[in-house]
Image (spheres, grey):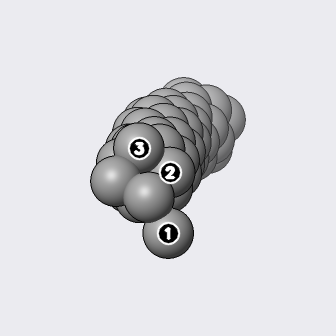
């Protein structure tokens, strides 16, 4: 194998590694973004449930009076 073909082979391998690293980083960022969305949704959902319980309790106490 000539030096030029060896260098080309090494450059191709380095390019594949960089491409893989970029894809992994994109996947990690996408996963992190989705995880943050899920956590945010869960917090909003929990807050809505607390508000519904609070509204139900205040409605029940006003009808008991």
Q: Residue at x 44, y 58 (%)?
A: 2
Q: Is residue 62 above or below residue 2?
A: above
Q: Position of residue 19 (x, y in %)?
A: 50, 42
Secondary element at image label 1: loop
- As drawn, the residue found furthest toward the bottom would be 1
Q: Residue at x 50, y 69 (%)?
A: 1
**Which label belongs to residue 1?**
1
Q: Residue at x 34, y 53 (%)?
A: 3
Q: Residues within 10 Å of mark 3 (few under 14, many from 20)?
A: few
Secondary element at image label 3: helix
Q: Residues within 10 Å of mark 2 (few under 14, many from 20)?
A: few
Which residue is label 3 attached to? Answer: 4
Q: Residues within 10 Å of mark 1 (few under 14, many from 20)?
A: few
Q: Are marks 2 and 1 in contact (CB under 8 Å)?
A: yes
Q: Is residue 65 above or below residue 2?
A: above
Q: Position of residue 27 (x, y in %)?
A: 53, 48
In the depicted view, which residue is nearer to us: 27 or 4?
A: 4
Q: Position of residue 62 (x, y in %)?
A: 54, 30
**Which label belongs to residue 5?**
2
> What distance separates the C-alpha of mark 2 from that of mark 1?
6 Å
Q: Are marks 2 and 3 in contact (CB under 8 Å)?
A: yes
Q: How many marks?
A: 3
In this rendering, position of residue 16 left or right of residue 29: right
In the depicted view, which residue is nearer to us: 42 or 64?
A: 42
Q: Residue at x 41, y 44 (%)?
A: 4
């Amino acid at each position: 194998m000539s030096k030029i073909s060896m260098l080309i082979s090494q450059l191709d391998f380095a390019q594949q590694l960089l491409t893989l690293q970029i894809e992994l980083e994109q996947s990690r960022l996408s996963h992190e973004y989705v995880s943050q969305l899920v956590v945010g949704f869960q917090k909003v959902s929990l807050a809505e449930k607390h508000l519904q319980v609070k509204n139900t309790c205040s409605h029940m106490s006003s009808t008991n009076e």
